[in-house]
Image: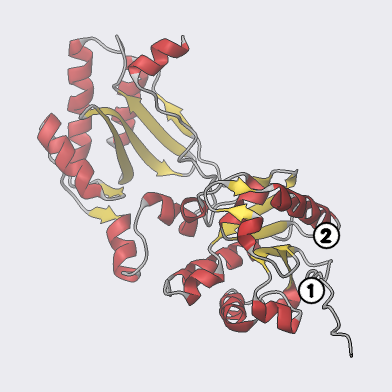
Amino acid sequence: MPFIPVQQERSYFGDGEKSSKICIVGESMSKWEIRSGRVFSGPVGTIYEQCLHGANLTRADVYATNIVKIEAKFTLYYREKKGFTDLGKEAVNALKKEISELDCNIVIAMGEAATFALTGRMDVTKCRGYIFPCVFNPLLKVIPTIHPAKVQFGDYIARHYISHDMNKAKEHSSYKGLKYDLTKVEIARTYLDAVTWLEEIATWKHVSIDIEVINYECSCIGFGKSIDTSIVIPFYGKDLYTLEQEINLWRLVAIIMYDENIAKTGQNFIFDMQFLLARNRIVTRGTIYDTMIRHSIAYPEFLKSLAFLTSIYCNRPYWKDMVSWKKKDQIKNDA
């Protein structure tokens, strides 16, 4: 009686040159990848290559690999929104060793699992397109993006996000470490500083404006002229100004907003205008540029939030979780 040979468990390692400056990390080997022995093949591979080509890249330009390099259920390694199992942690350690042997300057983390393994974050839909330091090598950059499998199952718009993130990775692949375009922001610490700045802003021909709201009151208002010139006027806090001083500051703000010779730019600026009108009786005039509306006209099917626009148009660190908000009773308990 002939014996039936038992299929040996095979490991499938990365695809591409180890000298590539860009590394792409997926999740696990699909049945198509098992058959071909190549990372990102089959229907997902077709989408993957289309996204590469959209960024003027080819497979030869990148090194691609997966977290799990054998044929296995990925749920044995990673649980969505929960993290890696013991098996998964072993696979991540192997991935770290694999990446450390490469000459890459940036890693594209495709999907939640790869993003969590390399950045410690799970919210890939929020942080995609931003550049983070790698958790095991601060000089290595990581840019999270959506996994091509999500495009395969209906989210066809996501392919454009993936191509953009790949192109961004290409732009930042020529150097090690993180380099952000940082804005110089001044904060008016005193009443005199605030008056001086507002009188200066009143002479500008174009200004970007943004307000922040706490308890349905304007807590601060920011004005920007360029990447090197931005000022924030705070209004939230105890004893910042006397009543007469605050009235005068709002009068100066009203002069700027009412001046039709000053062009004004904002994100979802209709909110700022109606809020200032409703709460502070400040009327806005002049030429209005709204970045959200302009982006929406150009790309009507894309997302429109400020976080998304920043990931597309800017080279800034992810800022949404830089501040943690607490209720008053939580602050008392911490104290």
Find disc 2 in the rendering and name its residue.
Answer: 103
Find disc 1 in the rendering and name its residue.
Answer: 16
- Percent across and percent down for residue 127 are 51, 51
94 vs 130, left or right, is right
Q: Which of the labelled discs sits on residue 223, or is there none?
A: none
| Callout 2 secondary element | loop
Specify the farthest residue to the front: 1
Q: Nearer the viewer, residue 72 or 49?
A: 72
**Residue at 34%, 17% in the rendered image:** 328
Callout 1: 10 Å neighbours few (<14), some, many (20+)?
some
Seen in the picture, residue 117 relative to 200 is either above or below; the reply is below
How many marks on residues? 2
Residue 186 occupies which quadrant of the picture?
A: top left
| Callout 1 secondary element | loop
276 vs 159, left or right, is left
Residue 180: tell me if it is visible. no
- Percent across and percent down for residue 258 are 16, 40
**Residue at 61%, 75% in the rendered image:** 52
Q: Nearer the viewer, residue 247 or 260?
A: 247
